[in-house]
Amino acid sequence: MDHPSTPAPNPTPGRLRLLAAVTVLGVVWCVVLPWVGTTRYVRPMIEHNERWGINPTALFYTDVETMTYRDQMLRRPQK
């Protein structure tokens, strides 16, 4: 089935694309996201979470005890 005249595929372009994708993800994770956290739009949200002791890495916000006050707010009837 294999033809001797068919050259083997070159793995270099795939490896370069993988390297480029990993590099882009690394730059976004290590440079862009920390910078976004210092902007005037995001920083107040981060400070609010820190002030209330909210762990943003929690899987569900229902796991955070300080969010129980919002439960009543969310469950009240909408006007």
Image (cartoon, grey):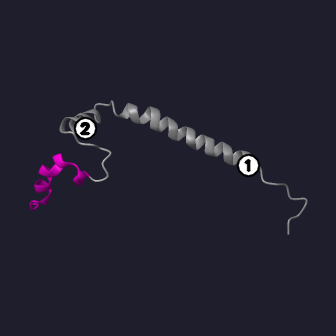
Q: Quadrant of the C terminus?
A: bottom left
Q: Position of residue 37 (x, y in %)?
A: 34, 34
In the rendered structure, does residue 63 fall within the stretch colored magenta?
A: yes
State the SS at label 1: loop
Q: Report, in whole angstroms, how far the alpha carbon at label 2 lies from the one at label 1.
A: 45 Å
Seen in the image, is 77 located left or right of residue 63? left
| CA neighbours of label 2 inside 10 A, class few (<14), some (14 to 19), many (20+) | few
Q: Is residue 44 left or right of residue 78?
A: right
> At x 39% / y 31%, what residue is drawn?
35
What's the residue at 30%, 48% (across, down)? 58
* Residue segment shown in magenta: 61-79
- Residue placed at 60% from the left, 41% from the top? 20
Q: Quadrant of residue 54?
A: top left
Residue tagged by mark 2? 45
Residue visible at 25% across and 51% down?
61
Picture layout, residue 56 above or below residue 6 = above
Task: Pick whichever, 41 or 4, lies toward us.
Answer: 4
Frontmost residue, 64 versus 27? 64
Q: Is residue 69 above or below residue 23?
A: below
Residue labelled with disc 1: 11
Quadrant position of the N terminus in the picture: bottom right
Residue furthest right as drawn: 4
Amino acid bearing label 2: Met
Instruction: Check residue 25 in the rendering and tell me which mark sits there, or answer none.
Output: none
How far across and down, in percent of the image, does residue 51 sit?
19, 35
Mark toward the start of the polypeptide (2 vs 1) = 1
In the picture, measured across the screen, residue 71 lies left or right of residue 37, that is left
Q: Main secondary structure of the magenta part?
A: helix
